[in-house]
Image (cartoon, rainbow, N blue to C red):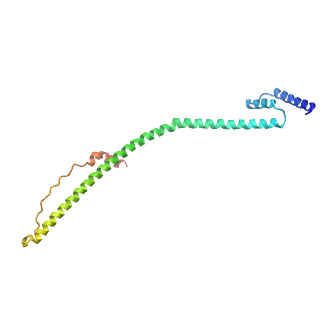
Amino acid sequence: MSAAGGREEGAAAAAMLQLLREQPEPQAEESGARRFALCLPPGEEVKEVEETIEEMLIRLDEFCGMTDVIRSDTSQILDETIPLIKAKVVEMNNIYAKIDKLEAFVKMVGRHVSFLEEQVLQAEGNHSTVSHAVRKLLQSAVIPSFKNKHTPSAQHTYDLPKLYRTEDYFPMNYIGTKYQSH
């Protein structure tokens, strides 16, 4: 560079500085960009730096906007959604407790049904073997009067074991109101 070229650049920079000082300050961001640009040598480099700064400011604004949206969404979640979720958790825990009770009830009923089924099978077995043996005995007897008569077999009394009562678990007033409301 020659001395004349350096003087011309210096004069151009001084003129630009003078113009900037005479103009009212626009926005703070542009003012900062212009001040930074004054420190750089004039020319294409200044325009590139100004464009880069403007682009960065736009991105900063977008970032601030996204941050505000996130902040408002977080507030909404904390204020509205979490209490609703907590209420549903309490409700679901009550439902889970009822399900556990129903499972225990079904197991108990299953045990009682199995017990009664065993007793019915045992009673059927006892009855069929006794009546079959009596019939064979009577048919093999020579006395014709016993062939057509049925002898009453020994009456077995059956004592019902203590089982659950459905009314204890499902009161009639509850069942009645449940069906009437639907």
Q: Position of residue 100 (x, y in %)?
A: 36, 45
Identified at 57% across, 38% down, the residue is 73
Q: Nearer the viewer, residue 33 or 177?
A: 33
15 w.r.t. 109: above or below: above
Q: Position of residue 112 (x, y in %)?
A: 26, 52
Q: Nearer the viewer, residue 114 or 50?
A: 114
Q: Nearer the viewer, residue 137 or 168?
A: 137
Identified at 14% across, 66% down, the residue is 133
Left or right of 97 in this view: 158: left
Identified at 86% across, 28% down, the residue is 14
Q: Position of residue 91 (x, y in %)?
A: 42, 41
Quarter of image, res 10: top right
Left or right of 59 in this view: 17: right
151 w.r.t. 72: above or below: below
Identified at 84% across, 36% down, the residue is 43
Quarter of image, res 8: top right
Left or right of 68 in this view: 119: left
Q: Position of residue 40 (x, y in %)?
A: 81, 32
